[in-house]
Image (cartoon, rainbow, N blue to C red):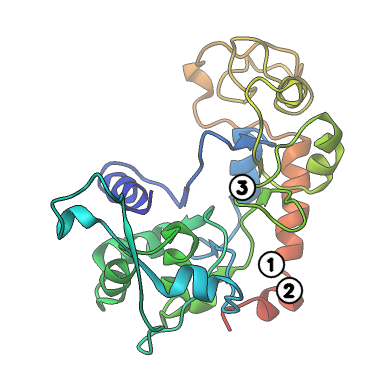
Amino acid sequence: MLATTLHAIAMLLRTAKWDWFINLSASDYPLVTQDDLMSAFANLPRDLNFVQHTSHLGWKMNKRGKPVIIDPGLHSLNKSEIWWVIKQRSLPTAFKLFTGSAWTFLSRSFSEYCIAGWDNLPRTLLLYYTNFVSSPEGYFQTVICNSEDYRNTTVNHDLHHITWDNPPKQHPRSLGQKDYRRMVLSNRPFARKFKQNDRVLDKIDHEILKRHHRHFTYGGWCSKGADDLSLSCSDLQSENYGVLKPGTGARRLRTLLSKLLSAQNLNKRQCK
């Protein structure tokens, strides 16, 4: 997953203009429209990175930091007996390990740094995380928090609504109809994860995204200039290229961003 993410970043750096790279999976679902998201982020500093992080590894120290996953096919001809081998290593001293959510909003500047790695830190850490368990939960956190140039650009949040069992299992709890109100009140732009074809997805489409069956999510790019949010959004209206029609989702997201970026919260939640 980490290699795929870095490859996607590299391709986008060469082919498109953008401000933030947002990694999502098929288990994620939006709680705001594209226009809401773009409107809420329009006035933010472009160097911000929304990366949930902590240096308190807890149980991950022994379960994530020390094990080395080795493919036995690299040193053994008998692949039928074992699929992979776990060896132990000591924690590094050249850099400090951080962990957090695998879901991030990365600035273009930091994304370019991860690819170009002009001070060699991203490449060094990529080698370290090659045989790491759940590397997406630590690579970007460790890179950004060990970089003098980027450690103070972090917003310690993944902008996802996720609920966990207690004690937490490997995967978060699936969201349903009973979670709808909490999802909306969280003011977060994405939620995960959902069971396939769960009815709450239809509720999100109808009440939040204004998306009709087999049509696109409502936005200024496809509206015909009217304010009726019930308009179908089935094709691109070229005359509206670049037009935004943010709704209540933009106001909710701005509320969350204002709270996260307040001086009191931002300074306390930097890399430690």
Location of residue 108 (image quadrant) = bottom left
Tell me residue 234's x, y (percent): 56, 11
Element assignment for label 1: loop
Tell me residue 262's x, y (percent): 73, 70
Residue highlighted by disc 3: 171
Toward the viewer: 60 or 255?
Answer: 60
Which label was assigned to residue 261?
A: 1
Location of residue 127 (image quadrant) = bottom left
Element assignment for label 3: loop
Q: Is residue 18 left or right of residue 105?
A: left
Q: Residue at x 38, y 48 (%)?
A: 1
Mark 2 residue type: Asn
- Disc 1 + disc 2, Cβ < 8 Å: yes
Which label was assigned to residue 118?
A: none
- Disc 2 + disc 3, Cβ < 8 Å: no
Mark 3 residue type: His
Which label was assigned to residue 265?
A: 2
Tell me residue 120's x, y (percent): 25, 76
Distance from the alpha carbon under mark 3 to that under mark 1: 29 Å
Judge depth for marks 2 and 3 and give the one in front. 3
* Label 2 crowd (10 A; few <14 / some 14-19 / many >=20): some
Q: Is residue 53 left or right of residue 3?
A: right
Location of residue 168 (image quadrant) = bottom right
* Label 3 crowd (10 A; few <14 / some 14-19 / many >=20): few
Counting labels gives 3
Distance from the alpha carbon under mark 1 to that under mark 2: 7 Å
Judge depth for marks 3 and 1 and give the one in front. 3
Toward the viewer: 100 or 172?
Answer: 172
Task: Mark 2 or mark 3: name the one nearer the start of the chain.
Answer: 3
Mark 1 residue type: Leu
* Position above or below: 126 against 217: below
